[in-house]
Image (cartoon, rainbow, N blue to C red):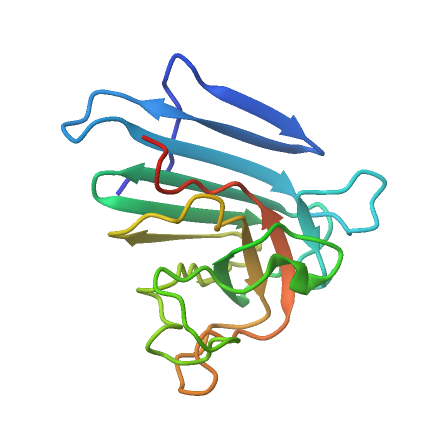
Amino acid sequence: MKTGFTTTAAATAALLVAGTGVAHGLDGGTAGGADYRLRASGQFAPSSSPVAPAAITYDHELVPPGAGIKVTQRVDGAGTTVAVSVRGVAPDHTYGVHVHTAPCGADPDDAGPHYQNREDPEQPSVDPAYANPANEVWLDFTTDGSGAARSVASHPWNFRMGEARSVVLHEHATSLKPGEAGMAGERVGCFTVPLMGDGVR
């Protein structure tokens, strides 16, 4: 497993918005065709900042302003791999972390529900048949003494284009219990990132 992704295509697009960098592009040379790789990074700030931040903190103790986040994605013939790393958040703390369907906003609920490969017809989804780490993208991690951590999740499927728009940090680890599956407490931070899906190749 690679520990980071880089973009090497000649036609790489890069965008810098509100202190957040996003790089994405296509890599050739694999047996199954081109791979798609994305890398996005940002610093958490309050939603009330003069320039709307891509990385928003809703809890300044668990996600202090200025803490950093990086998200990488690789799409290839095997499916999708997403990785998240943080620095400067609360030390020695376990966070629930998931891919959500909508961009972040001033209200923590603006990011919408978890992305699901097979969508639960009942919402909010708390059925472990749907709310589980195989059908959703869970990236829970426990930080070290400096507030740093990294987590990776791989799936044999791709996102539906335009339906995976953010990565949300929650206050505690994610539950698998019936009736509360997928729940991880309050949303304490959110990073808007344009995760790619079917149709990128």
Residue located farthest toward the top when viewing the structure as drawn: 10
The correct choice, above or below, for 156 with respect to 131 in the image is above
* Lateral position of residue 75 relative to residue 143, left or right: left
The image quadrant where one finds the N terminus is top left
Determine if residue 124 is in view.
yes
Give the vertical position of 180 relative to 85 (above or below): below
Residue 88 shows in the view: no
The residue drawn where x is 42% and y is 14% is 11
Q: Quadrant of the C terminus?
A: top left
Q: Is residue 8 left or right of residue 105?
A: left
State the residue at coordinates (36%, 19%). Answer: 8
* Vertical comparison of 64 with 23: above or below: below
Q: Which residue is outermost to the left? A: 31
Q: Position of residue 104 (x, y in %)?
A: 65, 52
Task: Return the residue nearer the eye: 112 or 168.
Answer: 112
Residue at (24, 52) in percent of width and height: 156
Residue 44 at x, y percent in the picture: 68, 47
At a point 83% along the width and 45% down the height, the residue shown is 49
